[in-house]
């Protein structure tokens, strides 16, 4: 078996993996970035909506090449059709751009390569190399050849299904209630507001929501997430999405150009995102907003933090769990409270009837919110319906 050696091996060339590879390489480390597919960013499994503010935080400049459309705001739709429309000045971090995600991912991987990381496509991790109870690398299949890659530290950035973290001994298991099963159509020949993301709540998408993310020229991503415990029919998301589209005259004569399906975690993050010689980032670490299902920004931040901490660890040659603690501190300080608060809110909202959701949307619509984000929405709900948030009001 051919054996390779490096400082850091990163498993997965999504946003988190590419950012980790980039910043580790910028720190002078020898980095190998693995991607099991033949093309970075494909096949797509993403609604492609992101906010704007965090891009500056990770030093990525917006590029028209990977921005499909810029949003002017968002529309929240209650079960009976009440609409709360907000423009960008009030939309906070809940709207921004609709991406061409495959091009965005490629741009981040290109940056990792420019920083000095080696990018290996068609290279799938197949197991952890463990010697004397110590993680020392990964086994992989590269273009049909079984290989071993020995490294001082492994970054598990292999997404929602993350096997790398489990192979290395971390618990990444999920309860069914903390999983949404999703399907999305890329549609053409439809008539939706071109610069507003739309979110439809209630029994049309049990435990989740329906989204319409415009991509310009009569096209949009139209998708749905349904909570795992509420799936009873078999192919539930498709059933609900097709029913919604058939009843909406803006959509029901449209053309479906692409179908993507998958799952997303809706829990507050794993208990440990590090172990000796192991860092877990992004979706693999459950760093996904439990209410919105958004995880791109969290993955990018976590990857950046990981790469910077790995560069510091290299100065002493210590990649133990203790030495990697600054990474845990950085990502938890930046996003853990929000993940926990939104997880508790998700748990509560999944139990609410359509009538209650109607009342909530009307309450929000009549409120004076300077910036609309999940946190401020929960504050309004606390004022008008305190019983809904009493279990986690200390986090609001």
Image (cartoon, rainbow, N blue to C red):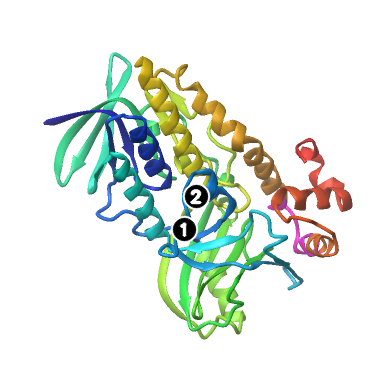
| Residue where numbered disc 1 is placed | 46
In the rendered image, which quarter is residue 267 located in?
top right
Question: In the drawing, does residue 103 fall left or right of residue 211?
Answer: left
Q: In terms of sequence position, does the residue under pointer 1 or pointer 2 come before the other? A: 1
Is 340 included in the stretch rendered in magenta?
no
Q: Tell me how many marks there are.
A: 2
Residue 202, image x and y in percent?
Answer: 69, 63
Residue drawn at x 49%, y 49% is: 296
Neighbor class of circle 2 (other Cα within 10 Å; few <14, some 14-19, many 20+) is: many
Q: Kindly tell me whether residue 158 is visible in this rendering.
A: no
| Residue where numbered disc 2 is placed | 296
Is 353 included in the stretch rendered in magenta?
yes
Residue 230, image x and y in percent?
Answer: 60, 55
Location of the N terminus by quadrant is: top left
> Which contiguous range is marked in magenta?
349-358
Residue drawn at x 59%, y 78% is: 192
Measured in 3D between alpha carbons, the distance from the residue under mark 1 to the one under mark 2, in whole angstroms, is 9 Å
- Image: 310 above or below 256: above
Q: Residue furthest right?
A: 384
Question: In the drawing, does residue 144 fall left or right of residue 54?
Answer: left
From the image, give the main secondary structure of the stretch colored magenta: helix
Residue 365, image x and y in percent?
Answer: 81, 64
Q: Secondary structure at mark 2?
A: helix
């Amino acid at each position: 078996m051919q054996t390779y050696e490096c400082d850091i091996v990163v498993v997965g060339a999504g946003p988190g993996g590419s950012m980790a590879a980039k910043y580790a390489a910028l720190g002078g480390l020898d980095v190998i970035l693995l991607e099991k597919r033949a093309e970075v960013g494909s096949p797509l499994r993403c609604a492609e909506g992101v906010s704007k503010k965090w891009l500056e935080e990770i030093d990525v400049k917006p590029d028209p090449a990977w921005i499909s459309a810029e949003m002017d705001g968002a529309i929240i739709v209650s079960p009976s059709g009440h609409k709360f429309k907000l423009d960008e000045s009030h939309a906070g971090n809940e709207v921004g751009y609709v991406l061409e995600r495959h091009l965005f991912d490629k741009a981040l991987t290109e940056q990792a390569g420019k920083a000095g990381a080696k990018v290996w496509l068609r290279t799938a991790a197949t197991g952890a190399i463990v010697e004397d109870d110590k993680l020392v690398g990964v086994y992989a299949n590269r273009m049909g050849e079984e290989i071993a890659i020995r490294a001082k530290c492994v970054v598990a950035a292999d997404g929602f299904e993350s096997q790398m973290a489990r192979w290395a001994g971390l618990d990444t298991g999920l309860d069914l209630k903390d999983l949404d099963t999703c399907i999305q159509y890329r549609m053409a020949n439809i008539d939706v507001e071109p610069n507003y993301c739309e979110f439809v709540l209630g029994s049309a998408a049990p435990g989740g929501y329906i989204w319409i993310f415009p991509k310009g020229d009569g096209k949009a991503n139209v998708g749905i997430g349904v909570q795992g415990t509420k799936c009873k029919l078999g192919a539930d998301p498709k059933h609900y999405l097709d029913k919604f589209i058939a009843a909406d005259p803006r959509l029901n004569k449209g053309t479906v150009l692409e179908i993507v399906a998958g799952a997303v975690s809706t829990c507050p993050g794993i208990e440990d995102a590090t172990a000796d010689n192991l860092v877990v980032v992004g979706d693999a670490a459950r760093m996904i907003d439990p209410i919105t299902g958004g995880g791109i920004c969290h993955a990018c931040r976590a990857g950046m933090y990981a790469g910077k901490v790995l560069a510091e660890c290299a100065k002493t040659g210590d990649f133990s769990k203790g030495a990697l603690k600054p990474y845990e501190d950085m990502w938890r300080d930046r996003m853990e409270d929000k993940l926990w608060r939104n997880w508790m809110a998700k748990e509560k909202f999944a139990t609410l009837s359509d009538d209650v959701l109607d009342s909530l949307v009307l309450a929000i619509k009549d409120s004076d919110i300077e910036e609309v984000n999940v946190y401020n929405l929960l504050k309004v709900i606390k004022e008008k319906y305190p019983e809904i948030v009493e279990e986690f009001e200390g986090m609001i």
